[in-house]
Amino acid sequence: MTWDVFVTRPIPEPGLSLLRAQCRVALRESRKIPTREEILTGIRDKDAILCLLTDPIDRAVIDAAGPRLKVISNYAVGFDNIDVTYATEQGIVVTNTPGVLTETTADLAWALLMAAARRIVESDRFTRAGLYDGWDPMLLLGWDVHGKTLGIVGLGRIGQAVARRARGFQMRVLYYDAYRPPAEVEQALGVTYVPFETLVQESDFISVHTPLTPETRHMFNAEVFRRMKPTAILINTSRGPVIDEAALVEALRERRIAYAALDVFEHEPALTPGLADLDNVVIVPHIGSASLETRAKMAELAATNILAVMNGQRPPHLVNPDVWDRRRKG
Ligand code: DGY
């Protein structure tokens, strides 16, 4: 039977073409974030939804879909926008798009690290403003990257890709993760596990790659900023609420830490008051995976996840494998 699929926003064509070849696709054409009402209406009587990290897929939305809903395919690796527990209870498969965006997101984490360390954005603004009147030994001094200590919080796929890039800069790499990978992984990457406390105190750069969970919400708060080096630079390409943004604004304003570079925000898309007024922060609009190649691969994968379930095959990236296993047994 042909499936009806609700796609909440335009995504790169390879994904849409794949879906259209086998399903009836209801594409919401606007690039603006859908309202709750639009999601509640759009999902009604659909077999699958292809949604984005900006779409809260909670109990009410899942209930609004009705009994036909079988797949929630998130166009993202993070899935904190979805009530996975309720979807699992309802026997609905939840999928995501890991792997294809790993290297691209690690590239951006490094771009932000370098931009902060060498004050690239400030320098660009300064030069464009016509303020450059000749070489100056004291102008826009930043911090060296090579030979410094990098602390990685969350050594999943992206954290590992960030660690690999650090080799070229001869850095000492520390990491903290609640789940430690096998020793071979640590050795191959040349990284050392330390408790969070130690990482915070010893790192010159801290790059955050942990998913957002109740445990990681506000993992970086006023107390943690007090324990970081005054020269430390904090980079976040994971999820905004991992950092208490009001406390970060305060820490940056008082130079308790040197700099931050953020791709994600606590109340996205809104910025905490004061953040955009600071010179010692680089802010970009959640573009970690935003390369032409990677966004196309994410679209293909999000579509493939839906089509696999429709055709009775295990989808490439299941968030709740229990549901799939139950379906197979049942
Ligand atoms: C994700 O996939 O979770 C990123 O935040 C966007 O690509």
Image: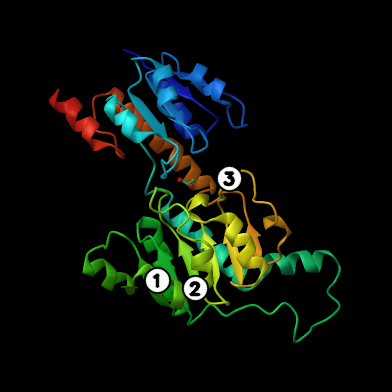
- The image position of residue 120, as x and y in percent, is 67, 68
Q: First in sequence, mark 2 or 1: give its number.
A: 1
Q: Is mark 2 within 8 Å of ligand 1?
A: no
Relative to 51, residue 79 above or below: below
Structural distance between the alpha carbons of marks 2 and 1: 8 Å
Disc 2 and disc 3 in contact, CB within 8 angstroms: no
Tell me which corner region of the image, top left, top right, bottom left or bottom right, holds residue 72: top left
Location of mark 1 (residue): 197
* Amino acid residing under circle 1: Glu
- The image position of residue 293, as x and y in percent, is 49, 46
* Amino acid residing under circle 3: His
Q: First in sequence, mark 3 or 1: give its number.
A: 1
* Amino acid residing under circle 2: Arg
- The image position of residue 191, as x and y in percent, is 34, 73
Asked whether residue 93 appears in the rendered view, the answer is: no
Residue for point 60% across, 56% down: 246
Disc 2 and disc 1 in contact, CB within 8 angstroms: yes
Q: Residues within 10 Å of mark 2 (few under 14, many from 20)?
A: some
Given residues 235 and 291, the one toward you in this image is 235
Q: First in sequence, mark 2 or 3: give its number.
A: 2
Relative to 241, residue 121 above or below: below
Location of mark 2 (residue): 227
Structural distance between the alpha carbons of marks 2 and 3: 25 Å
Tell me which corner region of the image, top left, top right, bottom left or bottom right, holds residue 91: top left
Q: Residues within 10 Å of mark 1 (few under 14, many from 20)?
A: few
For label 2, the SS is helix
Q: Which mark is residue 267?
A: 3
